[in-house]
Image: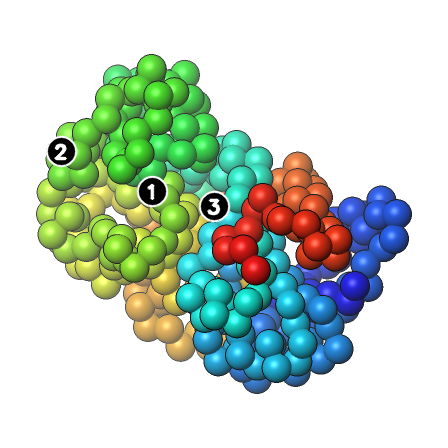
Amino acid sequence: MKIAVFSTHTYDKTFLDEANQREPAPFDLIYQEAGLSLQTVAFAQGCDAICVFVNDVVNAPVLEALHGLGVKGVFLRCAGFNNVDIDAAQKLGLLVARVPAYAPEAVAEHTIALILTLNRHTHRAYNRVREGNFMLSGLLGMTLQGKTVGIIGTGKIGLAVAKILNGFGCRLLGFDPTPSPEFTAIGEMADLDSLLARSHIVTLHCPLSEHNRHMINSKKLGLMKPGAMLINTSRGALVDTRAVILALKSRHLGSLGIDVYEEESGLFFHDRSSDIIDDDVFQRLMTFPNVLVTGHQGFFTTEALREIADVTFENFNCLANGRSCPNAVLKA
């Protein structure tokens, strides 16, 4: 089976090739550095399936073009599938499969890294010391023990975050349409407004859907404690970035840590250091000293990449052998 792998970086090839070498009959992987879009869909010519990542465009026109080329499967190297038009795929009879959960501890640990860095200003302290400035002014943080942390989404990643913060001695509030029994053993479930009003730190760990886009908007930000911290390592569009900028300007929001951004597709996973970045909203966000942005690296550990590759190949084999796929977003 021939598979076009879009948005390929060196690390993708390393772990996918490693997994492919363990296959009795290895797949023919065609690596493409380009992301999938209507302009690049022709790269899938002659392929039985494609493999994509979080910012690839897999909308109805792209899916129709893929179907016209004879593609039978769309495989995601991630858990989220908000970039795929599921209805269109269903109508075309395409198998769409994902990696539903991979090393949730990796994203959870990155979340904690953002919290600790913002709270104790270690990123600023590092730069100061390298310049010979050992002053402590402006680096004052708070002790996390006893502080209330609101966790929006208590699935595997949210639960992993909760367990770590429980070890810090934090009080935990959770919001989730489907409460987790494991979470309620160490924290308290609350409605969203109550969670926002009571938390010193709010962290997002939920998938993006049409129902929760901009769930953190100006109204919800207004409910948060003055000086509270907001963390997002899930999907950028959960947060209204323009509303966040206003909350930062007014000093109501104390700090922001994000590993995702609503318009990240033209920025993240690329070296733009020699370019002029013309995203004015992102550039304004970067002017705040109390904002920390990382480029969607929360998943980026050896263990997570190996698990992503292994599960992706399990999904490949389902299509190749005509088996039902347990990780299918919809069944072909």
Q: Residue at x 23, y 26 (%)?
A: 189
Given this view, does label 3 or label 2 mark the residue nearer the observer?
2
Instruction: Determine which of the numbered discs, if any, sits on residue 194 in the image.
Output: 2
Mark 3 residue element: helix
- What residue is shown with label 1? 204
> 86 left or right of 51?
left
Q: Position of residue 233 (x, y in %)?
A: 41, 46
Secondary structure at numbered mark 2: helix
The amino acid type of the residue labelled 3 equals Asn
Q: Residue at x 17, y 34 (%)?
A: 191
The image shows residue 211 at horizontal and vertical percentages of 26, 55
Q: From the image, state whether disc 1 or disc 3 is nearer to you.
A: 1
Q: In this orientation, which residue lies closer to the viewer: 10 or 249?
A: 10
Q: Is residue 174 above or below residue 321?
A: above
3D distance between C-alphas at marks 1 and 2? 15 Å
Residue under numbered circle 3:
127
**Separation of marks 1 and 3 at Cα, in angstroms:** 28 Å
- Proximity of marks 1 and 2: CB atoms separated by less than 8 Å: no
Is residue 141 in view?
no
Q: Would you identify the image quadrant in which residue 186 lies?
A: top left
